[in-house]
Image: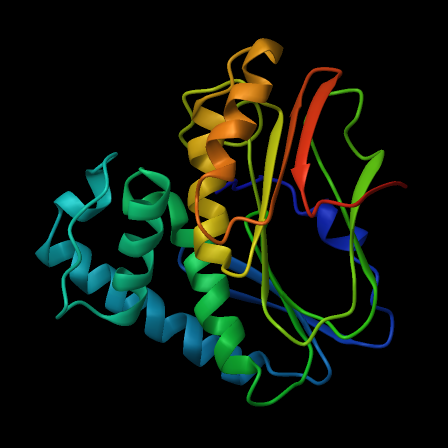
Protein backbone atom coordinates (compact mmCIF):
# COMPACT_ATOMS: atom_id res chain seq x y z
CA UNK A 1 0.00 0.00 0.00
CA UNK A 2 1.19 3.54 -0.78
CA UNK A 3 -0.60 6.58 0.62
CA UNK A 4 0.66 9.55 -1.42
CA UNK A 5 0.08 12.95 0.17
CA UNK A 6 -0.79 14.50 -3.19
CA UNK A 7 -3.49 13.02 -5.38
CA UNK A 8 -2.42 14.56 -8.69
CA UNK A 9 -1.86 11.13 -10.22
CA UNK A 10 -5.60 10.55 -10.26
CA UNK A 11 -5.80 12.70 -13.38
CA UNK A 12 -3.49 10.24 -15.16
CA UNK A 13 -6.34 7.77 -15.68
CA UNK A 14 -8.19 8.90 -18.78
CA UNK A 15 -11.82 7.80 -19.08
CA UNK A 16 -13.49 11.04 -20.26
CA UNK A 17 -17.06 9.77 -20.59
CA UNK A 18 -17.26 8.41 -17.06
CA UNK A 19 -18.43 10.03 -13.83
CA UNK A 20 -15.73 10.72 -11.22
CA UNK A 21 -16.19 11.30 -7.49
CA UNK A 22 -14.32 10.90 -4.22
CA UNK A 23 -15.30 9.14 -1.01
CA UNK A 24 -13.64 9.96 2.31
CA UNK A 25 -14.19 8.03 5.53
CA UNK A 26 -11.54 8.58 8.21
CA UNK A 27 -8.14 7.75 6.65
CA UNK A 28 -9.72 6.19 3.57
CA UNK A 29 -9.75 8.51 0.55
CA UNK A 30 -11.12 6.77 -2.52
CA UNK A 31 -11.34 8.16 -6.02
CA UNK A 32 -13.98 6.39 -8.09
CA UNK A 33 -14.88 6.36 -11.76
CA UNK A 34 -18.04 4.64 -12.94
CA UNK A 35 -20.73 4.97 -15.56
CA UNK A 36 -22.90 7.01 -13.20
CA UNK A 37 -22.69 8.81 -9.87
CA UNK A 38 -22.51 6.16 -7.15
CA UNK A 39 -21.15 8.40 -4.42
CA UNK A 40 -23.97 7.55 -1.99
CA UNK A 41 -23.72 3.81 -2.57
CA UNK A 42 -19.94 4.01 -2.40
CA UNK A 43 -19.93 5.97 0.84
CA UNK A 44 -22.24 3.45 2.49
CA UNK A 45 -19.91 0.60 1.48
CA UNK A 46 -16.73 2.33 2.60
CA UNK A 47 -18.32 3.26 5.93
CA UNK A 48 -19.52 -0.32 6.42
CA UNK A 49 -16.13 -1.91 5.74
CA UNK A 50 -14.18 0.70 7.72
CA UNK A 51 -16.50 0.33 10.68
CA UNK A 52 -16.28 -3.46 10.78
CA UNK A 53 -12.48 -3.27 10.45
CA UNK A 54 -12.15 -0.65 13.21
CA UNK A 55 -14.34 -2.68 15.58
CA UNK A 56 -12.30 -5.82 14.90
CA UNK A 57 -9.03 -3.99 15.55
CA UNK A 58 -10.37 -2.66 18.85
CA UNK A 59 -11.14 -6.24 19.88
CA UNK A 60 -7.93 -7.69 18.38
CA UNK A 61 -5.19 -5.01 18.58
CA UNK A 62 -2.56 -7.46 17.35
CA UNK A 63 -4.25 -7.39 13.96
CA UNK A 64 -3.08 -3.83 13.32
CA UNK A 65 0.43 -4.30 14.73
CA UNK A 66 1.46 -7.63 13.24
CA UNK A 67 4.11 -7.61 10.50
CA UNK A 68 3.71 -11.36 10.09
CA UNK A 69 0.80 -13.33 8.60
CA UNK A 70 -2.03 -14.14 11.00
CA UNK A 71 -4.28 -17.18 11.21
CA UNK A 72 -7.68 -16.89 9.57
CA UNK A 73 -10.57 -16.09 11.93
CA UNK A 74 -13.70 -17.67 10.47
CA UNK A 75 -15.86 -15.36 12.60
CA UNK A 76 -14.16 -12.17 11.40
CA UNK A 77 -15.94 -9.77 9.01
CA UNK A 78 -15.25 -10.12 5.26
CA UNK A 79 -12.68 -7.32 5.07
CA UNK A 80 -10.62 -8.89 7.85
CA UNK A 81 -10.70 -12.32 6.21
CA UNK A 82 -9.72 -10.79 2.86
CA UNK A 83 -6.75 -8.99 4.43
CA UNK A 84 -5.60 -12.07 6.36
CA UNK A 85 -5.70 -14.24 3.25
CA UNK A 86 -3.73 -11.67 1.26
CA UNK A 87 -1.15 -11.39 4.03
CA UNK A 88 -0.78 -15.16 4.19
CA UNK A 89 -0.17 -15.37 0.44
CA UNK A 90 2.47 -12.63 0.53
CA UNK A 91 4.04 -13.48 3.88
CA UNK A 92 3.24 -10.10 5.46
CA UNK A 93 0.93 -8.70 8.11
CA UNK A 94 -2.72 -8.11 7.16
CA UNK A 95 -2.53 -4.32 7.29
CA UNK A 96 -0.23 -4.41 4.25
CA UNK A 97 -3.35 -4.98 2.16
CA UNK A 98 -5.83 -2.61 3.79
CA UNK A 99 -6.09 -0.08 0.95
CA UNK A 100 -6.35 -2.76 -1.70
CA UNK A 101 -8.91 -4.73 0.31
CA UNK A 102 -11.19 -1.72 0.70
CA UNK A 103 -10.90 -0.92 -3.01
CA UNK A 104 -11.65 -4.56 -3.86
CA UNK A 105 -14.72 -4.98 -1.68
CA UNK A 106 -16.23 -1.60 -2.51
CA UNK A 107 -15.52 -2.16 -6.20
CA UNK A 108 -17.21 -5.55 -6.20
CA UNK A 109 -20.29 -4.01 -4.58
CA UNK A 110 -20.48 -1.11 -7.05
CA UNK A 111 -20.45 -3.51 -10.01
CA UNK A 112 -24.10 -4.17 -9.17
CA UNK A 113 -24.81 -0.61 -10.33
CA UNK A 114 -22.23 0.00 -13.08
CA UNK A 115 -20.64 -2.47 -15.53
CA UNK A 116 -17.34 -0.55 -15.39
CA UNK A 117 -15.72 0.62 -12.16
CA UNK A 118 -12.28 2.00 -11.32
CA UNK A 119 -11.38 2.66 -7.69
CA UNK A 120 -8.08 4.17 -6.58
CA UNK A 121 -7.22 4.07 -2.90
CA UNK A 122 -3.76 5.32 -1.92
CA UNK A 123 -2.17 4.23 -5.19
CA UNK A 124 -3.95 0.87 -5.23
CA UNK A 125 -6.46 0.16 -7.99
CA UNK A 126 -9.52 -2.03 -8.46
CA UNK A 127 -10.40 -2.07 -12.15
CA UNK A 128 -13.19 -3.47 -14.27
CA UNK A 129 -12.99 -1.68 -17.61
CA UNK A 130 -14.32 -2.87 -20.96
CA UNK A 131 -12.18 -0.29 -22.76
CA UNK A 132 -8.38 -0.20 -23.27
CA UNK A 133 -6.78 1.59 -20.35
CA UNK A 134 -3.33 3.03 -19.62
CA UNK A 135 -2.30 3.56 -15.99
CA UNK A 136 0.60 5.95 -15.42
CA UNK A 137 3.31 4.90 -12.96
CA UNK A 138 4.51 7.40 -10.35
CA UNK A 139 7.92 6.44 -8.97
CA UNK A 140 9.00 9.41 -6.87
CA UNK A 141 12.30 10.97 -7.94
CA UNK A 142 13.20 8.17 -10.35
CA UNK A 143 13.96 9.38 -13.87
CA UNK A 144 11.34 6.90 -15.05
CA UNK A 145 8.57 8.42 -12.95
CA UNK A 146 5.65 9.67 -15.01
CA UNK A 147 7.21 8.41 -18.24
CA UNK A 148 5.86 4.86 -18.20
CA UNK A 149 2.38 3.46 -18.18
CA UNK A 150 0.86 0.00 -17.94
CA UNK A 151 -1.58 -0.78 -20.73
CA UNK A 152 -4.49 -2.98 -19.78
CA UNK A 153 -6.70 -4.67 -22.39
CA UNK A 154 -10.50 -4.42 -22.22
CA UNK A 155 -11.87 -6.84 -19.65
CA UNK A 156 -15.05 -7.56 -17.73
CA UNK A 157 -13.17 -9.31 -14.91
CA UNK A 158 -11.67 -7.51 -11.89
CA UNK A 159 -8.02 -6.50 -11.97
CA UNK A 160 -5.95 -5.41 -8.99
CA UNK A 161 -3.04 -3.10 -9.87
CA UNK A 162 -1.27 -1.89 -6.73
CA UNK A 163 1.91 0.06 -6.09
CA UNK A 164 4.19 0.18 -3.07
CA UNK A 165 7.19 2.45 -2.54
CA UNK A 166 10.09 2.65 -0.13
CA UNK A 167 10.83 6.29 -1.06
CA UNK A 168 7.38 7.88 -1.46
CA UNK A 169 4.70 8.34 1.19
CA UNK A 170 4.68 7.22 4.81
CA UNK A 171 3.62 3.60 4.49
CA UNK A 172 5.97 1.10 6.10
CA UNK A 173 8.53 -0.48 3.76
CA UNK A 174 11.84 -2.13 4.53
CA UNK A 175 13.13 -1.59 0.99
CA UNK A 176 14.22 1.32 -1.17
CA UNK A 177 12.34 0.72 -4.42
CA UNK A 178 10.82 3.84 -5.93
CA UNK A 179 7.89 1.77 -7.15
CA UNK A 180 6.77 -1.84 -7.07
CA UNK A 181 3.59 -2.47 -9.03
CA UNK A 182 1.81 -5.83 -8.92
CA UNK A 183 -0.94 -7.15 -11.19
CA UNK A 184 -3.37 -9.87 -10.07
CA UNK A 185 -7.14 -10.53 -10.04
CA UNK A 186 -7.35 -9.19 -6.47
CA UNK A 187 -6.45 -5.67 -5.33
CA UNK A 188 -5.93 -7.01 -1.79
CA UNK A 189 -3.43 -9.62 -3.01
CA UNK A 190 -1.67 -7.11 -5.28
CA UNK A 191 -1.36 -4.66 -2.39
CA UNK A 192 0.14 -7.25 -0.03
CA UNK A 193 2.53 -8.64 -2.64
CA UNK A 194 3.68 -5.15 -3.66
CA UNK A 195 4.64 -4.53 -0.04
CA UNK A 196 6.41 -7.89 0.23
CA UNK A 197 8.33 -7.39 -3.01
CA UNK A 198 9.23 -3.84 -2.03
CA UNK A 199 10.67 -5.10 1.24
CA UNK A 200 13.10 -7.23 -0.77
CA UNK A 201 14.48 -4.42 -2.96
CA UNK A 202 17.19 -2.31 -1.35
CA UNK A 203 19.45 -1.90 -4.40
CA UNK A 204 19.19 -2.55 -8.14
CA UNK A 205 20.95 -5.88 -7.54
CA UNK A 206 17.84 -7.14 -5.73
CA UNK A 207 15.48 -6.68 -8.69
CA UNK A 208 15.79 -10.13 -10.27
CA UNK A 209 15.68 -11.98 -6.95
CA UNK A 210 12.49 -10.11 -6.00
CA UNK A 211 10.89 -10.85 -9.37
CA UNK A 212 11.77 -14.54 -9.03
CA UNK A 213 10.19 -14.62 -5.58
CA UNK A 214 6.95 -12.96 -6.73
CA UNK A 215 6.49 -15.41 -9.60
CA UNK A 216 5.95 -18.22 -7.11
CA UNK A 217 2.84 -16.66 -5.58
CA UNK A 218 -0.38 -18.10 -7.06
CA UNK A 219 -2.57 -15.62 -9.00
CA UNK A 220 0.17 -12.98 -9.33
CA UNK A 221 0.18 -12.14 -13.03
CA UNK A 222 2.85 -9.47 -13.35
CA UNK A 223 5.34 -7.30 -11.46
CA UNK A 224 7.16 -4.06 -12.24
CA UNK A 225 10.05 -2.85 -10.06
CA UNK A 226 11.66 0.59 -10.41
CA UNK A 227 14.65 1.74 -8.37
CA UNK A 228 16.50 4.81 -9.58
CA UNK A 229 17.04 4.48 -13.33
CA UNK A 230 16.81 0.68 -13.25
CA UNK A 231 13.72 -1.44 -13.65
CA UNK A 232 12.68 -5.06 -13.95
CA UNK A 233 9.47 -6.51 -15.38
CA UNK A 234 7.90 -9.95 -15.31
CA UNK A 235 4.61 -11.38 -16.49
CA UNK A 236 1.61 -9.72 -18.10
CA UNK A 237 2.86 -6.15 -17.66
CA UNK A 238 2.65 -4.29 -20.98
CA UNK A 239 4.65 -1.08 -20.67
CA UNK A 240 4.10 1.99 -22.84
CA UNK A 241 5.68 5.43 -22.84
CA UNK A 242 3.44 8.34 -21.89
Residue at left 58%, top 20%? Answer: 208
The colour scheme is: rainbow
Residue at left 32%, top 65%? Answer: 79
Is 214 above or below relative to 97? above
For residue 10, side relative to residue 225 (left or right): right
Is 177 above or below relative to 54? above
Is 80 above or below relative to 112? above
For residue 72, side relative to residue 177 (left or right): left
* Residue in the foreground of this view, choosing between 14 and 216: 216
For residue 218, side relative to residue 139 (left or right): left
Which x, y percent locates residue 34?
Answer: 69, 77
Residue at left 15%, top 51%? Answer: 71
Which x, y percent locates residue 186?
Answer: 49, 60
* Residue in the foreground of this view, choosing between 239 and 21: 239
Q: Which residue is most to the right?
A: 242
Residue 141 can be seen in this image: no
- Count the marks: how many? 0
Residue 34 can be seen in this image: yes
Q: Which residue is most to the left?
A: 59
Which x, y percent locates residue 201?
Answer: 51, 19
Which x, y percent locates residue 219?
Answer: 49, 54
Q: Split into 4 quadrants, where in the image is the C terminus?
A: top right
Residue at left 80%, top 20%? Answer: 143
Residue 58, picture quadrant: bottom left
Amino acid sequence: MVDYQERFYRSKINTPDWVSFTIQVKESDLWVRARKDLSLEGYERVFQYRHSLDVYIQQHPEFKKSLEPLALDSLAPPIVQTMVQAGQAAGVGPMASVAGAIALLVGQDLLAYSPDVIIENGGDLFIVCREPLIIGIYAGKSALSGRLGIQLPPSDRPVGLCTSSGTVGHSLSFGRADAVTVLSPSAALSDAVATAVGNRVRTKNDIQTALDWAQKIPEVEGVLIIIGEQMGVWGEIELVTI
